[in-house]
Image (tube, helix red, strand yellow):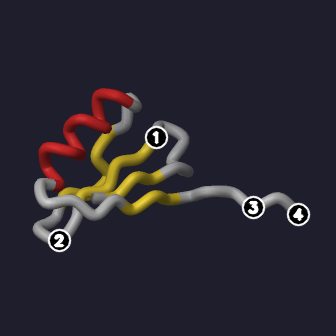
Amino acid sequence: MIGRLYAIVIDCPDRSELAAFYEKLLSLSRLEDTPEFIALGSTTGTEVVAF
């Protein structure tokens, strides 16, 4: 069985700025934007990048 990567979490001092960069770079959309974290996801809904 081959594993699958579902999420990447990046710890950073300015999550809003970094999320905006990756949002444009990877053509992702914001799934959640809370005071604790921002989650970006693809149109298929399987891959997530969180800051």
Q: Name the residue under label 1.
A: 42
What residue is shown at x 54% (from left), y 41% (from top)? 44
Q: Is mark 1 on a helix, strand or loop?
A: loop
The single residue placed furthest to the bottom in the displayed view is 36
The x and y percentages for residue 34 are 16, 65
Image marks 1 and 4: residues in contact by CB distance under 8 Å: no
Ranked by sequence position, the earlier of labels 1 and 3 is: 3
Q: Residue 1 carries which label?
A: 4
Judging by the rendered image, the residue that carries numbered circle 3 is 3
Q: Distance between the residues labelled 3 and 2?
A: 28 Å
Quadrant of residue 18 within the rendered picture: top left
Disc nearer the start of the sequence (3/2):
3
Q: How far apart are marks 4 and 2 (CA)?
A: 34 Å
- Which secondary structure, mark 4? loop
Percent of width and height locating residue 37: 22, 65
* Kind of residue at badge 4: Met
- Residue under label 2: 36
Tell me the CA gap for discs 1 and 3: 19 Å
